[in-house]
Amino acid sequence: MTAPPPTGLRRAGRLLWLAPREAVVLVLRLYQLTLSPLLGPVCRFAPSCSSYAVTAVRRYGVLHGGWLTARRLARCHPWNDGGWDPVPERPHEHSTTTS
């Protein structure tokens, strides 16, 4: 049995739920396209902090993704070597390999 298609009210609720997330992503993308090129390559991490923020907000939402981004920015200082630091995967996103 298939689920009924989303009603207009459900669709509107989903859009309202995603609106803050997409608004934050839009601000981050504007930063990436305007200010980031002027600053040059100064990030000590890969992916860059703004790319990390976009991924974190899309994956976890504004609050948790913002918290992860704030923690990442706190690690960005001269005494940290940086390096590869991806956004942690959600528990159900782990892929398993079978041999």
Image (cartoon, rainbow, N blue to C red):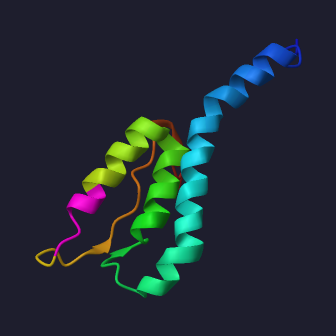
Is 4 positioned to the left or the right of 35 in the image? right
* In magenta segment, residue 75: yes
How many marks the image carries: the answer is 0
Residue at x-position 10% and y-position 76%: 79
Which region shows up in magenta? 72-77
Residue positioned 88% across, 13% down in the render: 4
Is residue 48 visible in this depiction of the protein?
Answer: yes
Is residue 13 placed above or below 57 in the rendered structure? above
Say if residue 94 shows up in the picture.
Answer: no
Q: Is residue 92 left or right of residue 12?
A: left
Vertical side of 87 occupied by 51: above or below: below
Give residue 46's position: percent from left, percent from top. Answer: 39, 74
- How far across and how far down the image is residue 44, in percent? 30, 79
The answer to which of 36 and 57 lies nearer the viewer is 36
Residue, x 77% and y 23% (percent of image)?
12
Residue 95 appears at what percent x and percent y? 53, 49
Q: Residue at x 41, y 55 (%)?
A: 87
In the image, 49 versus 86, the foreground residue is 49
Front residue (pair 18, 89): 18
Q: Quadrant of the N terminus?
A: top right
Residue 93, position in %: x, y? 52, 43
Asked if residue 63 is positioned above or below residue 81 in the image, the reply reads: above
